[in-house]
Image (cartoon, rainbow, N blue to C red):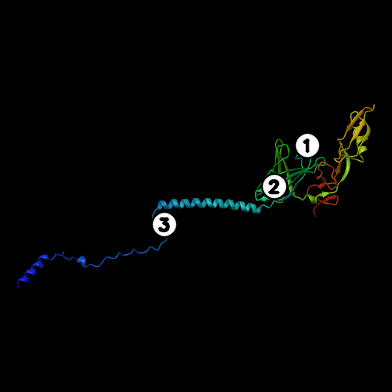
Amino acid sequence: MPEIQITLRVLATTKRKLPPASSEDFAMPKVRTPKPSDGRTLVDRLLDRIKNNRVAAVVIIACLGIGALASLTDSTRKLTDALSSLTSKSVAGEWKSHAAAFYPSFGQEFMRLHLQEPTADQLVGFVQFSGNEEMRPRIFPILEGKRSGKSLRLSFDSGDRVREIVVGDLAGSELRLVYQREGRGAVSATARHVVQATQLVDGRFGILYKRKEYPDHRTACLQLLKDLDPPEIYKQSEPPDEYGNVHCVGQHADGRGGFDMFQNSVRQQLICPPNSRGALVDGKTPKSAKGCECDGELIASGSQCVPRA
């Protein structure tokens, strides 16, 4: 039995000592409990934070108010412009003023506006002055034309590098215009929609001297020579040329040469019917007698100017 006792002693001396077991060794493993989900959106959470911060809320509300006011102001302006554009009818077409002395040295004549509207605020076309039997029509392209609602402004150059301006306002069916030129006073005129083609009437040609008609060029030249100081004797005269000029020649009582001019006060001119005036004379005698234009808004009926039906 001594071998058994020796073996037990060896086992007892070699046995490892284990640490005492604790209660944690027998506890269940810990499980992390998830947080309850927040069903609010990002906007809702932002609004909650703003509610809890009064200063931030005031600043944000003020910024929103300023932005809304700016947007409202811009929208109001655009709406006003749109309404103004809608309520103002088009000014495109032919507008004719009553006769006025736009150029004092030229006498009474019409001013016509031939307008087109490429855009809501732009005007193009030309300005025409006519209606003076002794002056050919003058037509000037519009250099700059603007429209704002019922108001318009046109500028043109009459050829002497002087800017001329026409401003006006649309009032019902009329354009109330003011013509302005540097160095001269303003001339007011009222224009209406009138198509020139409906106003052209037949005139006739005659020989005039000092605005009086004579039966022929010889009779008119005789009168011109009598009015000279001293008076002269009639020598000869020639029929009017393509420009309407009548050549008158005279001589003194002693036989010396006297008056001899191609361009003088005796001329062939277009004589227009009552209530009309020359409008289509272009520097030469018109090939057709249909060169007279009815005054105002009268319209042509044959060789007469009559009121609109």
**Circles 3, 2 touching at the beta carbon (< 8 Å):** no
**Residue 218 screen position, x and y as percent:** 93, 37
Query: Which label's residue is closer to the chain start, 3 or 2?
Result: 3
Q: Where is residue 308 drawn, in percent x and y?
A: 80, 53
Q: Is residue 84 left or right of residue 291?
A: left
The quarter of the picture where residue 247 lies is top right
Instruction: Give the residue displayed 50% in from the left and 51% down from the top.
Output: 67
Secondary structure found at label 1: helix
Identify the amino acid type marked 2.
Answer: Val
Mark 1 against mark 2, which lies toward the viewer? 2
Q: In this figure, what is the number of numbered marks?
A: 3
Residue displayed at 64% across by 52% down? 85
Where's residue 2, x and y in %?
4, 71
Horizontal side, residue 9 vs residue 152: left or right: left
Question: Which residue carries the number 3 mark?
Answer: 46
- The residue under label 1 is 105
The CA span between labels 3 and 2 is 57 Å
Which secondary structure, mark 2? strand
**Residue that mark 2 sits on:** 124
Question: Depth check: 181 or 290 in front?
Answer: 290
Q: Give the Cα distance between marks 1 and 2.
A: 28 Å
Q: Are marks 1 and 3 in contact (CB under 8 Å)?
A: no
Q: What type is the residue that disc 1 sits on?
A: Ser
Crowdedness of circle 1 by 10 Å Cα count: few (<14), some, many (20+)?
Answer: few
Task: Estimate the x, y position of residue 293 in percent, counting from the top left.
Answer: 81, 47
Q: Residues within 10 Å of mark 3 (few under 14, many from 20)?
A: few
